[in-house]
Image: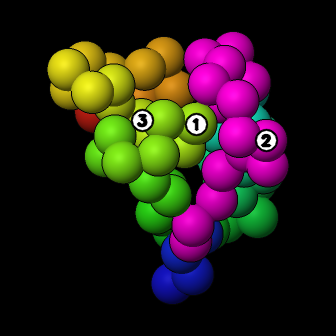
């Protein structure tokens, strides 16, 4: 199987819509190409523009599309 690795937005701005849209685009294209899974860069809050969780560990909207892609409810 092939896995998509270290994908994410190019800009260093904290923008939930941009992150959601770019994540959805990567994942939907990966799925269309039969890619088995994906590893996002970075899930933790070390770099605020790439993280999928905020410093209080609440999830940003892009986590929703990650869960859908991964088959979680």
67 on left or right of 8: left
State which tag comes first along the sequence, 1 or 2: 2
The alpha-carbon separation of the residues under discs 3 and 1 comes to 9 Å
Q: Start and end of the magenta stretch?
A: 5-20
x, y (%) of residue 67? Answer: 37, 33
* Residue at figure coordinates x 33%, y 30% from the top left: 53
Judge left or right: residue 46 versus residue 58.
right
Residue 31 vertical placement versus 62 (above, below): below
Dot 3: within a 10 Å radius of its alpha carbon, few (fewer than 14), some, or many (20 or more) residues? many
Q: Secondary structure at mark 3?
A: loop
Instruction: Please give the name of the residue rendered at 66% of the width and 66% of the height, measured from the top-left corner.
Output: 34
> Residue 70: horizontal and vertical position, in percent?
38, 45
Q: CA distance from mark 3 to mark 2?
A: 15 Å
Compute the Cα span from label 1 to label 2.
8 Å
Residue 60 at least partly seen: yes
- Residue for badge 2: 11
x and y, in percent, of residue 73 in the image = 26, 23
Q: Give me the disc on residue 49.
A: 1
Query: Which marked residue is nearer to the observer: mark 3 or mark 2?
Result: 2
- Give the camera-side residue of 59 and 26: 59
Verify whether residue 37 appears in magenta: no
> Where does label 3 land, which residue?
52
Q: Position of residue 59 (x, y in %)?
A: 32, 21
């Amino acid at each position: 199987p092939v896995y998509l690795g270290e994908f994410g937005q190019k800009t260093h701005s904290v923008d939930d819509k941009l992150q959601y849209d770019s994540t959805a685009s990567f994942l939907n294209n990966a799925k269309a190409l039969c890619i088995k899974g994906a590893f996002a860069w970075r899930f933790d809050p070390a770099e605020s523009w790439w993280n999928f969780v905020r410093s209080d560990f609440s999830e940003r909207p892009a986590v929703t599309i990650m869960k859908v892609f991964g088959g979680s409810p």
